[in-house]
Amino acid sequence: MAQRSPTTDSANAANAARGSGAQTPATAAGAKSAVQKALEKLGLKRDIDLALHLPLRYEDETRITRLRDAREGDHIQIEARVTACEVSYRPRRQLVVTVDDGSDTCTLRFFNFYPSQQKALGVGNHIRARGEVKGGFLGWTMLHPSFRTAGGDLPTALTPIYPTVAGLPQPYLRKAVLAGLARAELSDTFAPGDLSRLNPHALWTLRQALQFLHHPTPDVSLDTLQDHTHPAWQRLKAEELLAQQLSQLQSRRARALLRAPVLAERTQADSLHAKLLAVLPFGLTGAQQRVGMEIAADMARPLPMHRLLQGDVGAGKTVVAALAACICMDAGWQCALMAPTEILAEQHFRKLLSWLEPLGITTAWLTGTQKAKERRSMLALIQSGEARLVVGTHAVIQEKVKFHRLALAIIDEQHRFGVAQRLALRSKAPSGAVTEPGEDGAAVPHGLHDPRHQVEPHLLMMTATPIPRTLAMSYYADLDVSTLDELPPGRTPIVTKVINESRRDEVVERIRSQIAQGRQIYWVCPLIEESEALDLTNATQTHADLAAALKGTVRADGQPVLIGLLHSRMATEDKKTVMGAFIAGHVSVLVSTTVIEVGVDVPNASLMVIEHAERFGLSQLHQLRGRVGRGAAASACVLLYSTGDGPRLGESARERLKAMAQTNDGFEIARRDLEIRGPGEFLGARQSGDAMLRFADLATDNALLEWARQEAPMLLDRHPHLAERHVQRWLGGKAEYLKA
Ligand code: ADP
Ligand code: MG
């Protein structure tokens, strides 16, 4: 196939080369700029972007079907003469048109119509109408068919329908896409044969695949186009997955050029690590030991660690983090631990303080709400290096915070943080603190930034939202993943009950009996105030109701029952007081909004009630449930749901609650969550920094994903220029952002 000029952006040259037939989407300058704007909104800037903008579906306008040959439910196009056209008012206002194609008649009904359409459908006019035919026995009808004046040749290819935005009608978009397709540089970056290993039918070049998908011939089965199993789709999906793998591999390799402090583990009995192990009230699980070694091995290398520690709620990630911090501090460096909420950060702070203070470690605490004076003294401790551990919220990454020698950054509940925040932590590198003198220094041209001289802290991210395997292989391919697949011993599985809101009294009864046994209870509400839009139960109201209902209940220790209230609008001091009282066991029931969602650890709590559970996402529900079942006592989670005005719950809410009742396994929950929501929402914050897959579907394209994973390193090693072209083609300007 003839190659076009690689400088595809100079459309003029390409247009000239194509000679006649050059079409621009619109002629009027004003209209053109509006089209241009709409195109940009769709992210269609380059020719290749247009070429890769694929149809959502197709309409078959290539054939005329005679009404006599139609079958019930067929989507057909007819050509017929209008024999009657009138507005009828029963059962409601509608335009009723009768047409006759010589073989039979058909009634076309329009509930919304303009005078211009009424005119076009005047008696005697010849039209082409397209739609679904129904009701053969009583005579055919089409509801809201599309139609136009008959005449002109029938198209020879299916008509593509593209995803578009307001202000960009299909015909304009179609012209722009086809022009982009004609101009784009489409030479293959991998041979069709490379795919044949996988699928012998997949012998399509990129150009063939794109030509076909934009103008499929009418003989093709619409099904294979619609369900993306057609070889042309296979090629496109393989291309897309390969681009994703390549960009992740590139960022992995770019990171391998960076330097990080070598934090070798000291194994002596007087090491911090050994001392911490000695004071812990429990022994590590096998999984904790294994994961700890994986992390230690990373930190002992001069390259920045980029590791995700995943483990179900309650798996014991904190102690793993603390042990990693010990290795870092023992090597003479600083460690920072960042958590997404103040409650969680504070809990970490307390726990780490209780473990490490006796070992002589000074820990600093940073949060957005602390007093200026306290903050100043913390900043000084951090800058001087006296504080060897820094724990806090987002405040840790603010510009004012200067570390003396930061070598390890730990991010808890990483899915709550965005790419920008992770980058900010990385930039807290100890500037010039460790350079390896002489190493390659001379090879760097003056004034150029050499990544090899940049020293980065090691990065350990933790999450209780496990990443399903397919996502780990695709979106998270640039991360090393450690998995805590074992819970500490002695936990009893949480029993989950899904209960209609109308049985609230039974739940209160249950609470009473838990209190009598000396246990503590969480009661979670979705919002703190009545909102007009969503009639949610007010946490304050629930708090008052529960207090009234539990009045007179006496605890196992004879004390009166206290019920706490925690919500995000409370002052920090008040939150701390309430949380502290709950941790200390003075408060029996904690009514709260989702501020307690992540990480909170009160082992004596054995019952979690979630009100309006139908409004929560699956991973959020699992996180909340994970607040109980942390001690030896049997724990339960009650999901109270309300169907609102309707008779039953919506489909996806039902799926979520069912999944919760059926399994406690975080991996299974994550898998179902991915199924229910799709990767876009599942990935949350990370999504903003990632190019989402548009064509490939991780649920069905596993084999292609495996192929791309194997292909990417080979292409990058053997044909780096092809690899680069491939990434540029698919990810264009987005590639840089992916390197975070
Ligand atoms: P998560 O992984 O959800 O962050 P945590 O680190 O908060 O879990 O640990 C949950 C609870 O389990 C804590 O009370 C912690 O002290 C305890 N824990 C951690 N590891 C062990 C272990 N090996 N044996 C017993 N208890 C443990
Ligand atoms: Mg945790």
Image (cartoon, rainbow, N blue to C red):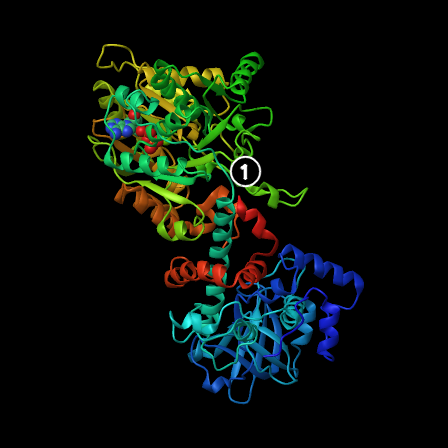
Residue 300 in the image: above or below residue 114: above
Res. 155 visible in picture: yes
The residue at 47%/86% (across/down) is: 68
Horizontal placement of 485 versus 408: left or right?
Answer: left
The residue at 38%/71% (across/down) is: 197
**Residue 85 placed where, x, y %?**
62, 76
Q: Check the picture and name the quadrant holding the N terminus.
A: bottom right
In-front residue for pair 44/716: 716
Residue 650 in the image: above or below residue 82: above
Label 1's element? helix
Instruction: State the image quarter where residue 398 is shown.
Output: top right
What residue did someone put label 1 on? 423
Horizontal placement of 662 versus 333: left or right?
Answer: left
Residue 238 in the image: above or below residue 4: above
**Residue 104 placed where, x, y %?**
51, 86
Q: Amino acid type of disc 1?
A: Leu
**Residue 439 placed where, x, y %?**
54, 40
**Residue 86 placed where, x, y %?**
62, 73
Tell which residue pokes out farthest to the bottom in this image.
Answer: 102
Residue 709 in the image: above or below residue 655: below
